[in-house]
Amino acid sequence: MRAARLHGYNQSLVLEDIPVPGIEANEVLVKVGAAGMCRTDVQLIDGYFRPYVESTFPLTLGHEISGQIEKIGSLVPRSAGFEEGDQVVVVGGWGDESCRHCHDGNTQICPHGKWPGFGPHGGYAEYVPVPAQYLIKVDKRFKLRAEELAPLTDAGLTPYRGIKKLRDAGALGPDRVLAVFGVGGLGSYAIQYAKLLGGGATVVAFARNPEKLASAKDLGADHVIDTKGKSIDDIRKELSTATGKSEIDAVIDCAGAEEMIRMGFGLLSVGAHYSSVCLVCDRINIPLFPFVAREYTYHGSFWGNYNDLSEVVSLVQQGKIRHAVKTIRFEEINENLDLLRTGDVIGRAVVKY
């Protein structure tokens, strides 16, 4: 099979032919139909995660995976309902099944877990072995395309969980302003979830790229604000003109840049909530006194679990989510990783097999 593999940090992926992997008795072999390309892939290549976990090379990138079942292991129970040829998406976080987080269903934050695309197997290959419990079957009646499904497993999943945290914390509702920071692969979905889950909150998208801001407006944002070259006072005035309020009540941050985080905290209202779902910088510096005295709440939100992804797939099957997808060929992977580095991809780049 074809695979795009990383043989060392700060190197281009090597496009090569390797054997199709075997499967364990409790696994399913998935023929990859499409794999989403994430900024996390660039960060993995560039060594962003080295202080936290060291990689073993070669590894196959690609953690956003959709495809079809090619083969089913002998110990996969029939009650799972899988058959060869079924269309599936892959849940990204594979837990050890024994810690308290796994027992709660949050396998993506298992301290001893693993993820596809961060080891020997990933979506930048034509086949990937997956433990059966981390597959979600997609109803073929809806005729969803592989390139639409693959990004749901991260770009479409991660902001969904982050906005659910804001909702469940009581941060959303009428007369609230919900800000979406960044309108890339994740932000495109976040805007739509903000309208679906926001309880009538006014949704304002913040970004630096006019084309992305136009996309945000098209996807349902009530207002958009271009932050490029502007002071926080300039942005506050635009926010007040657009919404009648000079502060924001909740943030879903799909940018993860230090400058954007500082700006966001400078705009928060009393009792506001901030949900971070994206990583660009590795440290943040925010004033402590307003954080305490104004009772801000900062939510870290990582990926999503099986139930979160099941809900996202259901929303897509009901036609409630639109996709902004750019399909690319396997041979174009390295070129598009460079575009991700500079933030020049509108929506989500997806490798289509």
Image (tube, grey):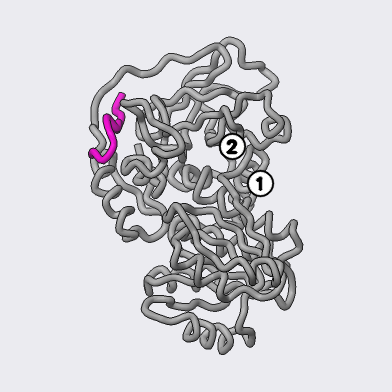
Q: Position of residue 29 (x, y in %)?
A: 47, 21
Q: Is residue 59 above or below residue 264?
A: above
Label 2 amino acid?
Answer: Gln
Q: Which residues are magenta?
A: 1-11
Whole-percent x, y for residue 194 in the image: 62, 64
Residue appearing at x 49%, y 59% in the figure: 284
278 or 317: nearer the viewer = 278
- 213 left or right, relative to 327: right
Tell me the residue at 55%/11% (across/down). Answer: 25
Name above or below for residue 180 compared with residue 229. Answer: above
Q: Which mark is residue 29?
A: none
Residue positioned 62% across, 63% down in the render: 274
Q: Earlier in the sequence, mark 2 or mark 1?
A: 2
Q: Secondary structure at mark 1?
A: helix
Q: Does residue 15 appear in the picture of this structure?
A: yes
Image coordinates for residue 347, horizontal then vertical, percent = 42, 58
Which numbered marker is on residue 311? 1
- The disc label shown at residue 108, or none: 2
The kind of residue tagged 1 is Glu
- On screen, residue 341 versus residue 158, left or right, reads left
Residue 200 can be seen, yes or no? no
